Amino acid sequence: MFTDSIKSWVTVVKPPLALRHVSSARPSLPPHGFKYRRLAAFPPHGVHAGLGQHCARGANEREVKSPLPSSSSHERERVCVRIPMAAVTSSRFISRTSCSGYGGAFDSESMTFQSRRVPYLRTLATTYEGLRTRNVVDSRQMQLNAKATSRQARRGTRHASQRPWAIVVCGSGMNLVFVGAEVAPWSKTGGLGDVLGGLPPAMAANGHRVMTVAPRYDQYKDGWDTSISVELKVGDRMETVRFFHCYKRGVDRVFVDHPMFLEKVWGKTGGKIYGPVTGTDYGDNQLRFSLLCQAALEAPRVLHFNNSKYHSGPYGEDVVFIANDWHTALLPCYLKTMYQSHDIYKNAKVAFCIHNIAYQGRFAFSDFARLNLPDKFKSSFDFIDGYDKPVKGRKINWMKAGIIESDRILTVSPYYAQELVSGVEKGVELDNILRMTGITGIVNGMDTNEWNPSTDKYISANYDATTVMDAKPLNKEALQAEVGLPVDPKIPVIAFIGRLEEQKGSDILAAAIPEFIDEDVQVIVLGTGKKKLEHQLALLETMFPDKVRAHLKFNVPLAHGIMAGADILAVTSRFEPCGLIQLQAMQYGIPPMCSTTGGLVDTVKEGYTGFHMGPFNVECDVVDKADVKKLVKTVKRALKVYGTPAFAEMIQNCMAQDLSWKGPAKKWEQFLLSLGAASSEPGIDGEEVAPLAVENVATP
């Protein structure tokens, strides 16, 4: 019996409607005497649902009771847990909330709000056995967790960073919650995933408590079920989501589990996050990302973690949310209407980060009703799409609403921020809104643990700045042999790595190759994308078999080999908010040859760390001949410098830079502190950013 196992610290009383079966199917209530499964007593490693541990009765304790009225039709057992009234933390005094007794609700909640939210919050302390059919992976995880617990009990030891669950420890710094549709290495299609993968550990290293919230697209083998569910209204239905969690590099990685995310993807998630194929969206993307935003607002309140030696317990309500791109633009809207209007998250702030303004989330105006927002938000979403001529009615624009309703706006490089307010062409019809709100640019960093030529396991000869000139010829020979080009370390190799689409300018490169291929040069292209461009590059390989290689399937080892063996990296983007590939190239001692746009202006210095081609025409319908001429001219200019002392100095300049997230993280800290969220202060102590092995997150 559940109550027998914990009778030393749990009082059993007759309950009101505070315990209820949470399920989208809404089954009938169980009969009296139905057995409960205690979740918080045996949680996954590092997670608890608010019940606490070692809660002996004492003078400084209280009994938590539900404020809800009792039920005359159904009598069930309710669990009342004795927990400390408060705990003294390392930086300030924190009042202990009564999450367990109120089913996850905080003392600051109004009675009306608690009553409305109880159907899904009240199950945090107790739930019924067999609520959800477990799949094979979940069952295996439970078995492994049980074995690990058994081994730990036999050893009689405790993990160094694991604290008694009744104690709340809050070090210096802010409580930060990054929310996004991607988080590398678990899910990634571009720079958004890289930012949410690399920036949070750097912020944690600066002494802040950091969580990321992203969809659970696959059966991540390092993500453990927290056994905590919440019920959310999406469209005209109530949906139940579960939270999975892992603790990596000082960051609480939280994954939102729901069939709208998981059922569409069996196997690898690449290219299937937003639609079944590249360029095609799922029809229910509005509902999917509405669910993500609501779940992200619940996560800091209902999930209690104790993995870090600097922080434990709930995140509380003094949180700074960082919403990323249009998928999370509803977060500030839901925060205002569902929480702050009920005196919850009163001091929370939202920063909205634009990674690519070309993707804004534009939908039919009639779809506003699906978002379950008050009519007062209609003006924030209202948008006339100038790209449809003649204009066929109004639309809603998620990104516009996110910009207007958030507290501050930022983007991923200073020059891109200038471009966004420069006019309709670069601001994609939101330039006037951004001029009104203002926008800050902070350049991205990169993961210098994964991309490090001195430790890279994929390259033939490891090197650093002192040995690069000796190792480059060896790596070039290995690269030429691998792709099937004539092996000659004296021939300069120009490489392109990226998506084969118009934004990346791969069509401009394909048109320019015949114009400069007569030079003493070899060209290697690695990437996948639009079939038309793949066919065009394959044709060039056929036309110039000794000079051109197009590898039209992404290959991680080959990407590392290209970085170590190529001499010049072509970055031909029509527009580039920040860009990561040029940072990786400079880390490996490759001067980039790039267009003059966005973050490429901030990261590549002409004649010092690379070559600039000038700005390209952003219209993607046809290839501008002027852009082709710019590219050809820059290639010939770079080839004249190749092999000279000036080129060797350029290589050294590239490798001398600190391209990690350390510098950007300090700027992010200053920006987020300027929001003035309650209890915000600079971080002091943090955990060192350790490498994250990709094998740890591989899917079954």
Image (spheres, rainbow, N blue to C red):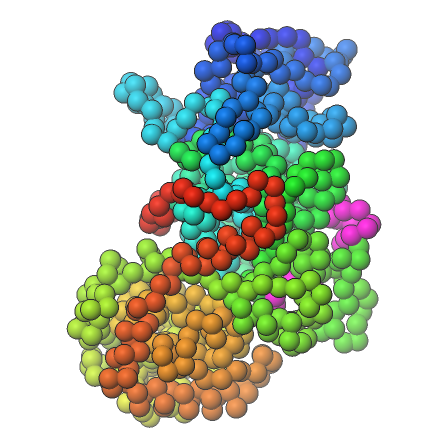
Please determine whether, in this image, residue 214 is positioned above or below residue 533. Answer: above
Please determine whether, in this image, residue 45 is positioned above or below residue 322. Answer: above
Give 387 or 28, whichever is nearer the viewer. Answer: 387
Q: Is residue 700 visible?
A: no
From the viewer's perspective, tell me whether residue 593 is left or right of residue 656. right
Going 55% across and 22% down the picture, which residue do you hit?
86
Residue 6 inside the magenta-drawn segment: no
Name the spot of residue 660 as percent of width and height, x first.
38, 59
From the viewer's perspective, tell me whether residue 546 is left or right of residue 80. left
Quarter of the image for residue 300 reads top right
Going 34% across and 86% down the picture, which residue do you hit?
638
Magenta residue span: 357-377
Q: Is residue 46 visible?
A: yes
Q: How many marks?
A: 0
Give 568 or 189, whichever is nearer the viewer. Answer: 568
From the viewer's perspective, tell me whether residue 468 is left or right of residue 25. left
Residue 368 inside the magenta-drawn segment: yes
Name the spot of residue 408 as percent of width and height, x first.
63, 56
Q: Tell me the quarter of the image containing the C terminus.
A: top left
